[in-house]
């Protein structure tokens, strides 16, 4: 296999997160669920390496989404879910040291923000180049979801004290 063909195949595997994006129903949610094993692996790393790995997913996602969309002459293919993977990893990473129910809150908040796309999240999905636009809205949604879940984790014990 030639290098361009190999790069194209690798970009496709990443973009659809090893097949999650090919789900006939709710590919974004399936992609987010497909990110959970990655999150569990990243939790084995020290926090700085976890953060670097999350940033690497974002960088690789921009490249893979750009290549995948360009090769198909599409602006935001529904099968591209690497953006949901990055958003999920970021959201869950912000509550990695919290009990599981905050992970669930971060996950659900991310899906809500990703689907609803309030304010600046919707604006970012139109960023160019295409790969950047595909990724940035989910990155912001993931960071906001994680921050909200972290805020809940800080507020709830204070309210119960």
Image: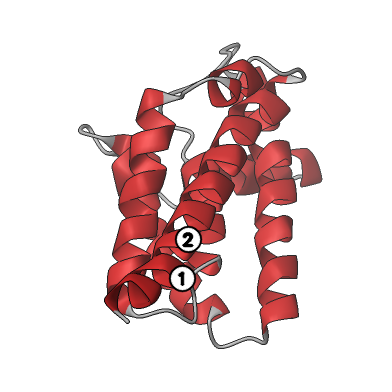
Quarter assignment of residue 115: top left
Q: Residue at x 41, y 70 (%)?
A: 153
- Residue that mark 2 sits on: 151
Which residue position holds label 1?
154
Along the line of sight, the residue nearer the viewer: 87 or 101: 101
Q: Residues within 10 Å of mark 2 (few under 14, many from 20)?
A: few
- Which of 24/72 is in front? 24
Establish if 140 lies above or below 149.
above
Q: Position of residue 25 (x, y in %)?
A: 20, 33
Q: Position of residue 135 (x, y in %)?
A: 62, 35
* Residue 71, visible in the rendered structure: no
- The image position of residue 109, as x and y in percent, is 36, 46
Quarter location, residue 104: bottom left
- Relative to 7, is 76 on the left or the right? left
| 142 sits to left or right of 29 | right
* Image x and y of residue 92, in percent: 47, 64
Colour mapping used in the image = secondary structure
Please tell me whether mark 1 sits on a helix, a strand or a loop.
helix
| 83 is higher (above) or lower (below) than 66 | below
| Residue at (76% x, 45% y) in the render | 2
* Quadrant in which the C terminus appears: bottom left
In the image: residue 124, left or right of residue 129: left
Residue at 35 percent of width and 41 percent of height: 111
Q: Residues within 10 Å of mark 1 (few under 14, many from 20)?
A: few
Mark 2 falls on what kind of element?
helix
What residue is rendered at 53% in x and 55% in y?
147
146 left or right of 60 in image: left
Disc 2 and disc 1: Cα gap in Å? 5 Å
Contact? badges 2 and 1 (CB < 8 Å): yes
């Amino acid at each position: 296999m030639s290098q361009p063909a190999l790069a194209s195949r690798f970009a496709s595997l990443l973009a659809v997160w090893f097949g999650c994006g090919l789900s006939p129903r709710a590919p974004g949610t399936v992609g987010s669920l497909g990110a959970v094993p990655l999150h569990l692996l990243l939790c084995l790393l020290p926090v700085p390496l976890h953060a670097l790995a999350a940033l690497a997913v974002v960088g690789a996602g921009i490249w893979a989404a750009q290549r995948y969309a360009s090769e198909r002459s599409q602006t935001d293919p529904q099968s591209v879910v690497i953006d949901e993977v990055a958003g999920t990893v970021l959201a869950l990473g912000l509550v990695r040291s919290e009990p599981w129910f905050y992970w669930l809150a971060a996950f659900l908040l991310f899906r809500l923000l990703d689907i609803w796309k309030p304010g600046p999240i919707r604006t970012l999905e139109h960023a160019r180049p295409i790969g950047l636009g595909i990724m940035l809205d989910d990155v912001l949604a993931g960071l906001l979801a994680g921050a909200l879940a972290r805020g809940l984790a800080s507020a709830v014990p204070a309210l119960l004290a």
